[in-house]
Amino acid sequence: MIIPAQSLLATLTFVSLALAHGWIGKVTIGSKSYLGNPPALYSTNPPPSVIRQIADVPPVKDVCSADLTCGTQATPAALQAPAAPGDPISVEWHTLAGAGYWFHDVGPLMVYLASCAGVASCAELDSSETTAAEWFKIDEQGRDGNGIWAQDKLDAGAPASFVLPQTLKSGHYLLRHEIIALHTAQYVGGAEFYVGCVQLNVTGHEEGAPNAKAGELVRIPGAYTPTDSGILIDVYDLLPSDAYPFPGPPVAALVSHAESGGASTSTQGKIRTTLPGVQTTEKPTAAKTTTSVKG
Ligand SMILES: *[C@@H]1O[C@H](CO)[C@@H](O)[C@H](O)[C@H]1NC(C)=O
């Protein structure tokens, strides 16, 4: 049988892109690691976790969707992870592809928290209650001074890393980690949102809280529009020195500058490691010649 090269290529491209989409497979808080379950489509009757399970791997593309809160049809997790203010946290995104590494490499990484006050555990917040929660941003990582995205490190196998605010008030929190893949974001609806939530039990005696009057608290969905300048954007037009306009609220003031990840000024990712047999680029060659509709 002769398969036309073009349809074979299309099939392979489709398969590799589907494999590239993912979920939070592991979170490390301080020195302790917790596993997340693959999406429900691939994992029925999963063991209890601190990471909310999503239904399937494709990205959320509608910024008004309830799936933007914690990922596609995310369900509450049974457990909460103990955490302390100032703990380093790393999040590993897993995919269905062999090596399991993240695949996309352009776009920001952001982290939000929402208090689960009023319930005994974040496990009690169902999806509609989670959507109604008020979120504040604790970290955002864009590009370094050479124009290298923080997301680029993930496809070499590195986890996304950040720090829990030093002064964070104790209590139960949902931690929302978000990757926005911007490789087709020059079109309205082209940005891809990958999100997952981890349930935390934060100990200690700190009192740091977000400032609602400063606009630090948002609903998700609700915090973004399809034409925000960081969501409708031709990233291949950016100069290395151009600042990326992060969508959503500012990083909450309770996060001191010293502890914020702020990849736009850090030197991380300067050296690109290419792993044999792992596709490390997805830059569409046509991107430079398309006419973008910038907002
Ligand atoms: C939260 O942590 C405290 C302190 O370790 C513990 O007493 C409490 O049972 C935990 N609560 C939940 C719901 O995880």
Image: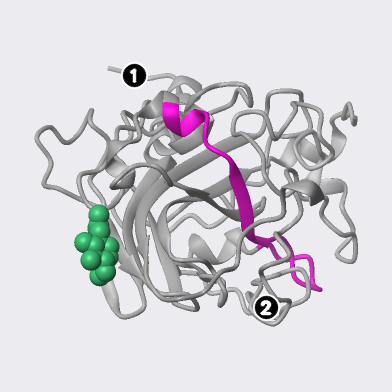
- The picture quadrant where one finds residue 290 is top right
Residue 40, labelled with which disc? Answer: none
Question: Which of 248 and 10 lies nearest the eye of the viewer?
Answer: 248
Q: Quadrant of ligand 1?
A: bottom left
| Residue plotted at (37% across, 71% down) | 203
On screen, residue 182 above or below 267: above
Residue 154, placed above or below residue 49 = below
In this image, 180 relative to 9: left or right?
right
Q: Secondary structure at mark 2?
A: loop
| Of the image marks 1 and 2, the number of the one nearer the N terminus | 1
Label 2 residue near ligand 1, CB within 8 Å: no
Residue identifier under label 2: 270
Q: Position of residue 227 (x, y in %)?
A: 81, 28
- Name which residue lies at 37% across and 39% down: 19
Q: Residue 229: which quarter of the image? A: top right
The region drawn magenta spans 129-149
Nearer-the-camera pick, 197 or 118:
118
The kind of secondary structure element at disc 1 is: loop
The residue under label 1 is 2
**Residue type at the position of mark 1:** Ile
Q: Is residue 258 visible?
A: yes
Identify the amino acid type marked 2: Lys
**How far apart in space, not on screen, are marks 1 and 2 (Cα)?**
44 Å
